[in-house]
């Protein structure tokens, strides 16, 4: 037990957290505009850490590829399944809601929400599968019911989220890319990209990490036929006046505005590539 007087402890409660001095989004945008090649600007606009491609970051007993400083700097939360502390963007938060038809509290995923009371679980498909088999009783301390198709539900929500995030931006923001050779694309001028969105209906791989443009190497390329519905893709091609059967690839420009989309796609890749046990 602390031997500090109660008055000193209360005084500390009223001290402002050092996190309150963090830059606002407007300040970050201004910083990126003033010095786009600076280290801090690159950290805010790069969700993959390609410059550190061969490095890994060890968190607890799990090794994650080097990813966004934003993700690793997210608030720390305790994983209710492993009882380990991890950055919240590497966890999926579950909230509880009353379901009047069953007269029970049900757990539901709250993607992106990382504040407030909730149950945080390591963002891994195999863990959600274990929860479905009954481990949810201990994880949620008997306070919630867990749907039997949670793996499929989380995947559907993830996919929908990427399309919603993509649609937030004007279609003109994305660059149409021309194929030059296998995994090699012609970009506009000196543009650099968070990732490439490919729409190849014959492709069998969700994501390849070794695509390149004339200005950039090791660009992640996502085959969106594995993520978006055919109807969504057809609407997109219609917006771009692209024939339905024509090849299409879009470059997602590297900027602070597209970090969230790149992060969402990274979550899809991590989730889909994990085997279900």
Image (tube, grey):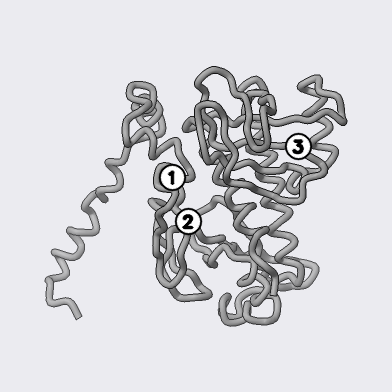
Mark closest to the chain's N terminus, 1 or 2 = 1
Q: Is residue 232 above or below residue 101?
A: above
Judge from the rendering whether residue 71 lies leftward or rightward of residue 267; answer left or right: left
Q: How many marks?
A: 3
Q: CA distance from mark 1 to mark 3?
A: 25 Å
Look at mark 3 in the image and give the residue it sits on.
Answer: 199
**Do callouts 1 and 2 mark residues in contact (Cβ within 8 Å)?**
yes
Look at mark 1 in the image and give the residue it sits on.
Answer: 49
Q: Is residue 77 visible?
A: yes
Q: Is residue 156 above or below residue 180?
A: below
**Do callouts 1 and 3 mark residues in contact (Cβ within 8 Å)?**
no
| Residue 106, quarter of picture | bottom right
In this rendered view, identify the residue nearer to me: 206 or 148.
Answer: 206
Q: CA distance from mark 1 to mark 2?
A: 9 Å
Judge from the rendering whether residue 109 lies leftward or rightward of residue 101; answer left or right: left
| Residue at 45% from the left image edge and 43% from the top image edge | 50
Look at mark 2 in the image and give the residue it sits on.
Answer: 65
Q: CA distance from mark 2 to mark 3?
A: 25 Å
Residue 265, percent across and down?
Answer: 61, 46
Toward the top, the furthest residue is: 189
Toward the front, the furthest residue is: 181
Mark closest to the chain's N terminus, 1 or 3 = 1
Q: Secondary structure at mark 2?
A: strand
| Residue at 54% from the left image edge and 36% from the top image edge | 194
Crowdedness of circle 2 by 10 Å Cα count: few (<14), some, many (20+)? Answer: some
| Residue at 61% from the left image edge and 72% from the top image edge | 127
Q: Secondary structure at mark 3?
A: loop
| Residue 277, quarter of picture | bottom right
Q: Is residue 258 above or below residue 100?
A: above
| Residue at 67% from the left image edge and 70% from the top image edge | 105
Judge from the rendering whether residue 160 lies leftward or rightward of residue 119; answer left or right: right
């Amino acid at each position: 037990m602390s031997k500090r007087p109660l008055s000193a402890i209360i005084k500390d409660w009223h001290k402002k957290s050092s996190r309150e001095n963090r830059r606002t989004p407007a300040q970050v945008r201004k910083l990126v505009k003033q010095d786009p090649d600076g280290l801090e600007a690159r950290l805010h606009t790069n969700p993959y850490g390609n410059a550190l491609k061969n490095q890994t970051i060890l968190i607890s007993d799990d090794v994650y590829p080097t990813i966004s400083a934003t993700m690793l700097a997210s608030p720390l939360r305790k994983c209710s399944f492993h009882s380990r502390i991890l950055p919240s963007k590497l966890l999926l938060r579950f909230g509880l809601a009353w379901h009047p038809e069953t007269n029970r509290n049900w757990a539901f995923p709250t993607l992106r929400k990382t504040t407030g009371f909730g149950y945080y679980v390591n963002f891994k498909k195999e863990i959600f599968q274990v929860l479905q088999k009954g481990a949810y009783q201990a994880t949620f301390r008997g306070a919630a019911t867990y749907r039997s198709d949670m793996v499929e539900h989380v995947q559907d929500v993830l996919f929908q989220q990427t399309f919603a995030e993509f649609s937030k931006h004007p279609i003109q923001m994305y660059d149409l890319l021309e194929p030059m050779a296998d995994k090699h694309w012609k970009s506009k001028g000196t543009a650099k990209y968070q990732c490439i969105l490919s729409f190849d209906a014959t492709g069998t791989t969700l994501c390849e990490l070794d695509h390149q443009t004339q200005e950039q190497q090791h660009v992640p390329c996502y085959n969106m036929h594995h993520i978006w519905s055919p109807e969504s893709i057809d609407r997109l091609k219609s917006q771009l006046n692209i024939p339905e059967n024509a090849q299409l690839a879009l470059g997602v420009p590297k900027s602070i505005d597209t970090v969230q989309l790149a992060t969402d796609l990274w979550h899809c890749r991590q989730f889909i590539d994990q085997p279900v046990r």
